Image: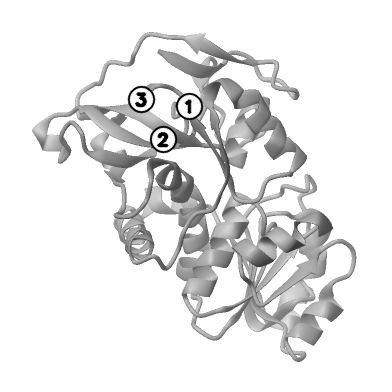
Amino acid sequence: MKALRVTALSPDLTGLALADMPKPERGRGEVLVRVRAASLNYPDLLMTRGEYQFKPPLPFVSGLEMAGEIVEADAASGFAPGDRVMGGAKTGAMAEYVALPGGALRPVPDGLSCAQAAAMGAAYHTAYVALVELGQLEAGQTVLVHGASGGVGLASCDLARAMGARVIAATHRADKREALAAIARPEAIILNAGRFREEVSELTGGRLCDLVFDPVGGDVFDESTRCVAFGGKLLVVGFVAGRIPEIAVNIPLIKGFSVVGVRAGEYARRFPERGERIAAAIDNLASEGAITPHIDRVLPLTAWREAFQAMERGEIVGKIVLEP
């Protein structure tokens, strides 16, 4: 089978190549899936550099998540050949076949294509854990979403809007405002370069934001501490900007807000029953049409370099999906 294999860590993708590999044999408790679509996530890119918190041993097949059809399964798995499933692990999705435990998969929600299902999992899970589980989002609250054009940011806009929140989408790319307006449909879009607190204050009538979703870090985090309402939460999701910021604890003390770390995958691993409940809630919202993952482009697996480079350059809105 064809698979995108990482044989060396590198800053420029030179350690990646499309390789011919044996089709995996499923182990005990595993099912074999024919991959129809695999989505690209920022951690996939970081893992090629050795810059992600999880560092798989070399060599490994790239890809966090995918969707496809069951090829082989035991009855005890709860699946049968032909079932459409979505899910994944930390690696292995960007291949023609993958063997996974049955518990790592769930049925594709009604109405979703395999491409949409592959694009939904990690992004919407992160958004749900951050906004709903940890942020305790309520209808009518105001949410500021940084990195709004990325897969996780766009999912957060979509989920927050579906739950009745007022969404302010933030991006550092002025050329993405028109696309964000059409896709995310927020109440407002701001540029988060430099000082943006006054604009947020004006948009909220001086009340500021109940939740700030920040996968960017750096200067964006620094300015975001000025955008959180009293009793609000600043959700720390990642550091795409590169600089891991610091905060003097007198700031959240005086302003009465919480800084909350979000590790969505670890949250589900530590609290598996909550993880199952979150997955069911997301799938229900998708089946009802309340949320819909946005795909920037679908490419063949042979075009993996174009996909990774597009993510590096930050030129996508939503998710890129690779089809083996």
Residue 211 position, x and y percent, is 62, 74
> Looking at this view, is 212 or 20 the one in front?
20
Total numbered labels: 3
Residue 123 position, x and y percent, is 51, 51
What is the CA distance from the residue labelled 1 to the residue labelled 2?
Answer: 11 Å
- Secondary structure under tag 2 reads loop
Does 237 sit above or below residue 86?
Answer: below
Type of the residue with mark 1? Met
> Looking at this view, is 185 or 14 the one in front?
185
Q: Label for residue 94? A: 1
Q: Which residue in the protein does label 3 denote?
A: 98
Q: Label for residue 153? A: none
Tell me which residue sits at (64%, 15%) in the image.
8
Q: Disc 1 vs disc 2: Cβ atoms closer than 8 Å?
A: no
Q: Along the horizontal axis of the image, is 296 left or right of 266?
A: right
Circle nearer the N terminus (1, 2): 2
Type of the residue with mark 2? Ala
